[in-house]
Image (spheres, rainbow, N blue to C red):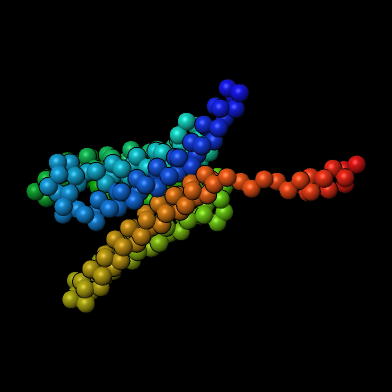
């Protein structure tokens, strides 16, 4: 009986992990939307990336050994973990970069981090979403939703960068601003989509499964004999 109780608690930890991770994603977005109000709260500006990183760690490791979207395989789990830590490191160094008078006065290490930041985040996220999709811990087709979200965010970011390099005409500036708004909406929408999918899947996992039809078992035993 004790073993059955431990098994039940471990099994129930999987939907709990997905629900908690999805909720943290949603709260991080709510904080971003309410950023002007959060500015008066000490540390309010740092709360959103902290919650986002916490959600990544929960999705990577689960709760009580259950709920890892990467099945705790080394590659995917390490990618999510390093991404969570990297986002916190980015948060810590963001103040150093913005407090510098210009990039000319910023330390070389900070400059290198600023230039590599976007590419490292993309690489880590790419590894993670491909592992989530390939391992199939998340039910199909939802296992590929993180990859779809990353593709949409990357495309909008790339368009913004390409247009920004084309020129400084009035039309290009207006279009660039529009694309920046689109990129922000894509990031927000992608995070909300991931949160909703995680919460809905957690709810499905918590629903009691219908009992097996005894007539099917009788037919299987009859065909086996």
Q: Residue at x 19, y 75 (%)?
A: 169
> What is the residue that sits farthest to the right in this orientation?
225
Asked if residue 191 shows in the view, the reply is yes
> Relative to residue 18, is residue 6 depicted above or below?
above
Residue 73 % position (x, y): 52, 37
Q: Quadrant of the C terminus?
A: top right
115, 19: nearer the viewer: 19
Q: Quadrant of the N terminus?
A: top right
**102 with respect to 86 (left or right):** left
**177 with respect to 127 (left or right):** left
202, 35: nearer the viewer: 202
125, 215: nearer the viewer: 215
Residue 90 % position (x, y): 26, 43
Q: Residue at x 47, y 56 (%)?
A: 145
> What is the residue that sits farthest to the left in this orientation?
101
Q: Residue at x 45, y 44 (%)?
A: 18
Asked if residue 72 shows in the view, the reply is no
> What is the residue that sits farthest to the bottom in this orientation?
171
Displayed quadrant of residue 173: bottom left
**92 with respect to 80 (left or right):** left
Residue 52 % position (x, y): 33, 45
């Amino acid at each position: 009986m004790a073993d059955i109780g431990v098994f039940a608690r471990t099994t129930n930890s999987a939907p709990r992990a997905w629900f908690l991770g999805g909720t943290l994603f949603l709260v991080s977005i709510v904080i971003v939307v309410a950023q002007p109000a959060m500015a008066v709260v000490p540390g309010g500006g740092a709360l959103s990336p902290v919650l986002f990183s916490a959600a990544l760690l929960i999705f990577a490791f689960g709760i009580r050994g259950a709920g890892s979207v990467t099945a705790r395989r080394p590659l995917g789990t390490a990618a999510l973990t390093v991404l969570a830590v990297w986002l916190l490191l980015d948060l810590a160094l963001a103040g150093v970069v913005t407090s510098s008078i210009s990039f000319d006065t910023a330390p070389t290490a900070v400059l290198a981090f600023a230039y590599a930041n976007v590419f490292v985040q993309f690489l880590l996220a790419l590894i993670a979403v491909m592992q989530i999709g390939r391992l199939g811990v998340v039910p199909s087709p939802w296992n590929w939703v993180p990859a779809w979200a990353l593709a949409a965010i990357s495309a909008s970011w790339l368009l913004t960068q390409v247009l920004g390099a084309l020129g400084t005409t009035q039309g290009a500036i207006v279009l660039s601003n529009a694309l920046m708004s689109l990129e922000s909406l894509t990031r927000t929408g992608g995070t909300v989509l991931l949160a909703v999918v995680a919460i809905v899947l957690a709810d499905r996992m918590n629903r009691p499964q219908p009992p097996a039809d005894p007539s099917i078992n009788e037919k299987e035993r009859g065909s086996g004999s």
